[in-house]
Image (cartoon, rainbow, N blue to C red):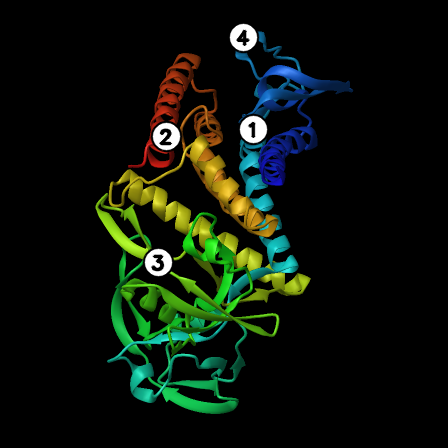
Amino acid sequence: MLEILYIIIALGLTIFFHELGHFLAARALGVGVTSFSIGFGPKLFSFKKGETEYLICALVFLGGYVKLQGENPEELNPNDKKAFLNQHPIKKIIIASSGVIQNIFLAFLLMWLVFTIGTDTLKPTIGEVKKGYPAYDAGLQKGDEIININGKKIKYWSEVTDIVTNFSGKELNIVVLRGGKELLFNIKPKIEEAEDILKDKKKRPFIGISPLAFLPVVDDVKKGYPAYEAGLKKGDVILEISGKKITYWDEVTDIIEKSKDTLKIKIKRDNEIKEFNIKPVVLEEKDNKKETESKKIIGIIPKANTIMEKYDIIKASDKAVSQVVSFTALTVKSIYKMLLRKIEADVAGPIGVIKISYEVAKTGIVNLMFLFAIININLALINFLPLLPLDGGLVLMFIIEWIRGKMVPLKIQEGLMQFGWMLLIFLLVFVTYKDIVRFFMKG
């Protein structure tokens, strides 16, 4: 299947870019490279050019490696000018950290491609106006399309969020489109304390609106459910249910949930009006607290209220840099809070990453590119932790060597290396176990 091929390519690129960083830095600084491998274990393919053997090995999912000339202390020739361990600590620091830098660069490149090609994002249409908040008091309504805020044209809901969240003035001048007419509203945001994704409480502006996420249009029909058996199809526009006119998707879900018998659903398909008699079924699911909850469904998935977010190459570069910086900061804070046990250590192992990647790949290659940009940022930061055998641990050893004027004793390095491998193996087993429980032992 194409999804698996996309994941293999994305994983291969991630490994390739990381190892390429070490390789290029070593070559540029005059250090010999004996091997450049994608994967570990049995050799699948190889060729030699100059002093370097290039390999692809069977266990690609475990990563890769670059073997440098003179990296083993026991085989080191002190007169070898191309030997890695004979280099100045600064050169060794640059070579050791170049893989991480390449992962960050790949994240930027993937983000740039995403914003250049374009990705679906929510339209700036209001889905809910909360009572007691400035937007409700000013007169904004569900279905209003925001087209301008403080003189800035609005195309995406994310722009509305950014402007409101970062607003520090007195009033927002919001222009909306309602029934074909432009209406102006002057709204003073309300300052409230809110908890962000990392459970930090901060005060920020609110006006009390949320986006219209879905439309009353069928985007998919699940096999084996009443809607599929009745004949509903992708693209059907739901007009009425049991005599009630439908404007929004939440009206559909509300009627289905409250239904006691068969529903008469009127839809529009290719300029033709059709009616279907459909009886909802009860679906029982376990929530996050593993408590069983029941809901009525007919087996349809709504169309998202989205628009293509696309930029020119310059603006896409700005957006990519902004996203990489934002996700990097978020990841650093997450790791810090997990280490201090301030937030739950909810991480995915190799199985989890592959499963999540597969689900995302089914929604499109652009979304998979965005996911792997985030994965590359996470890998870069984790790999830069000051723990041997990670790149960050090597950098730490070389910084100490620079300060001391001589290498860290081999016995100390070996002890730290053994401890590091034991910890990494334990963590790998732990996250793999969590993946198995999360994805294969539900319920």
Spatial separation of the CA atoms under disc 2 and disc 4: 41 Å
Tell me the kind of residue under disc 1: Lys
Spatial separation of the CA atoms under disc 4 and disc 1: 18 Å
Which residue in the protein does label 4 denote?
Answer: 74
Crowd rating for badge 1 (residues with CA inside 10 Å; few <14, some 14–19, many 20+): many
Tell me the kind of residue under disc 2: Ile
- 3 or 4: tag closer to the N-terminus: 4
The residue positioned farthest toward the top in the image shown: 74
**Label placed on residue 436:** 2
Percent coordinates x, y for residue 166 in the rendering: 40, 71
Mark 2 or 3, closer to the camera: 3
Percent coordinates x, y for residue 407 in the rendering: 47, 20
Which residue in the protein does label 1 denote?
Answer: 92
Tell me the kind of residue under disc 4: Glu
* SS state under label 1: helix
Crowd rating for badge 2 (residues with CA inside 10 Å; few <14, some 14–19, many 20+): some
Spatial separation of the CA atoms under disc 3 and disc 1: 66 Å
Spatial separation of the CA atoms under disc 2 and disc 3: 33 Å
- 3 or 1: tag closer to the N-terminus: 1
In the depicted view, which residue is nearer to us: 179 or 14? 179
**Label placed on residue 280:** 3
* SS state under label 4: helix
Crowd rating for badge 4 (residues with CA inside 10 Å; few <14, some 14–19, many 20+): few
